[in-house]
Image (cartoon, grey):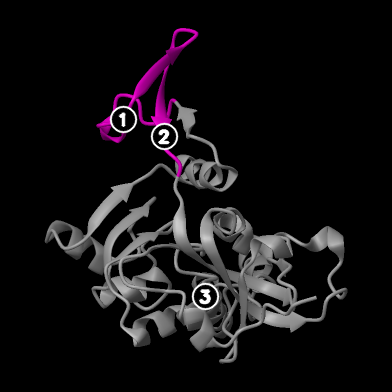
Amino acid sequence: MRSKVVTKEEALAKIKDGQTIMFGDWHGQITADELIDGVLEKGVKDIAAIAVSAGTPDQGVGKLIAAHRVKSLATTHIAFNPLARDQMFAGELDIEFVPQGTFAERIRCGGAGLGGCLTPTGIGTEVEEGKQKLTINGKEYLLELPMHADVALIKAWKADTAGNIVFRMTSRATNSYMAFAADTVIVEAQELVEVGELDPDEIDVPAPIVDMVYVKTGEKKPFCLVWQKAIEKAKAKAAETKAEGTNNGRIDRTCGDRISLCKVF
């Protein structure tokens, strides 16, 4: 079976100025960081980005926004990236805000070859401006058109050489459906295995959907940097209260549960 494993340079050769690119991540977390860094280094510009959020200035699509490489962004929110907000108000970045459920469904429609989806979400708000409305059984719906991309940059936990990939925890959130909605699907995998090593029942996206697999070479990072920071803060607080003798150094259960999620990814 032909190997789909490529070098970073081979993957980046598919990414060009002016393309529509989907960034599979979760608010800047669990993203194809090394490929995004490569896009920055290559100087790709005028990107029409599709991502669940604007990331942060130093993570995910936020890196490209910070470098003024993104001309438009379809997203659910930009709260974690003040640079996206500033560029929007300055007229430098065109942002389409999409309700999160609608965002997922529009991408699913793009991958399934459907003409769109009907949803009541946004009726009577700015979301409905310029969109077709239909009345079905006495209820109004918006017709939301599918989203599709030239390239999808997907982050996987594991991949085999044929291109079968496995996600981990919340990395499924946007990576899973974006992988089906682009002409070229490039995966950045944390770990590479041989064909046959993945349990068929654990494969999230099958090989025929994936065009290229790039294996991450740099330092592994915590699975979720946001939770990692929260844990570090909680540990510091626990140490402080232990020294004061107020709670015997106990870290609350919620924080303890999060520790298990913040493994390297």
**Residue 151: x %, y % from top left:** 47, 65
Disc 1 marks which amino acid?
Lys
What is the spatial separation of the Cα atoms under label 1 and label 2, in whole angstroms?
7 Å
Pointer 3 residue: 32
Q: Amino acid at mark 3?
A: Ala
Residue drawn 45% across the image and 7% down it: 138
Measured as percent of width and height from the top left, residue 54 is found at 36, 63
Label 1 vs 3, first from the N-terminus: 3
Q: Are marks 1 and 2 in contact (CB under 8 Å)?
A: yes
Residue 131 has which mark?
1
Q: Residue at x 43, y 25 (%)?
A: 120
Q: Mark 2 = which residue?
A: 144
Q: Which residues are magenta?
A: 120-146
Q: Is residue 113 magenta?
A: no
Q: Secondary structure at mark 2?
A: strand
The image position of residue 192, as x and y in percent, is 73, 82
Left or right of 9 on screen, residue 198? right
Image-quadrant location for residue 210: bottom right
User: What is the distance, in whole Å, between disc 1 and disc 3 at their CAs?
Assistant: 33 Å
Tell which of 45 and 175 is nearer to you.
45
